[in-house]
Amino acid sequence: MFTAIFGASLGLAIQTRRRWLRFLAPIGGLALAIAAHMLNNALPLIDALASAAAGEPPPEWQVAPDIGFLEAFLAGSLVQLTIFLPFVGLAGLVIWRSGVWERRVIREELAKEVGQTVTGDEYQDVLHDRMLRTRRIDAARPNKSAALVNAQHELAFRKRRVREEGNDPERDPLVAGWRKDINHLRAAA
């Protein structure tokens, strides 16, 4: 989970157009991941130190209970889930927003490719694409379909990156390469 928090912040930095957020998102994500990890490590320690400073014996719940592995696993998991539910929720929100951004980029960039590397029917599928729903072009050939969809998505993201760098995607050799790959995949039987 800690790695996911940091990774999500890196993804946000890559996706945003705001210069200040590109700089601060990784720093904030790292700080949040460190804070979550510190919370995980510190809460039991703080409780034990406070009890020891007060001269109290360990409470019953700190003494190893006479329960089986499965019971202990489930109880520990429930405690961890309760403590980290806000972080899990935040990670879920960031993943959802990332998916929204990705689908928007694909929609916008492939709109200009209709008739060139994307058919009209394929673009209609792009417009109706939703979270947790994988677009396929030819159900009878799943491998070829997946390769073609992946190449179209890579083309869309490359065009966006080139444009954000202030260059013309039509002059980019990688954009031309993705178009060539897409046409090659279509021609392959």
Image (cartoon, helix red, strand yellow):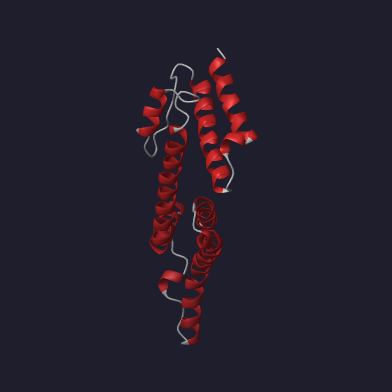
Instruction: Compare residues 63 and 164 and report the one nearer the observer.
Output: 164
Residue at 58% over, 43% down: 162
Compared with residue 104, is residue 9 higher up or lower down, i.e. above or below?
below
Picture coordinates of residue 179 (x, y %)? 57, 27
Residue at 45% over, 19% down: 138
Residue at 62% over, 29% down: 177
Instruction: Compare residues 117 and 49 and report the one nearer the observer.
Output: 117
Picture coordinates of residue 133 (x, y %)? 39, 34
Compared with residue 112, is residue 137 higher up or lower down, i.e. above or below?
above
Picture coordinates of residue 134 (x, y %)? 42, 32
Compared with residue 122, is residue 60 higher up or lower down, i.e. above or below?
below
Instruction: Name which quarter of the figure residue 168 lies in.
Output: top right
Compared with residue 152, is residue 8 higher up or lower down, i.e. above or below?
below
**View extreme (top): residue:** 189
Instruction: Name which quarter of the figure residue 99 lies in.
Output: top left
**View extreme (bottom): residue:** 54
Instruction: Compare residues 19 and 44 and report the one nearer the observer.
Output: 19
* Image quarter in which the C terminus is found: top right
Left or right placement of residue 130 versus residue 143 in this view: left
**View extreme (left): residue:** 128
Picture coordinates of residue 8 (x, y %)? 50, 53
- Total numbered labels: 0
Residue at 40% over, 32% down: 126
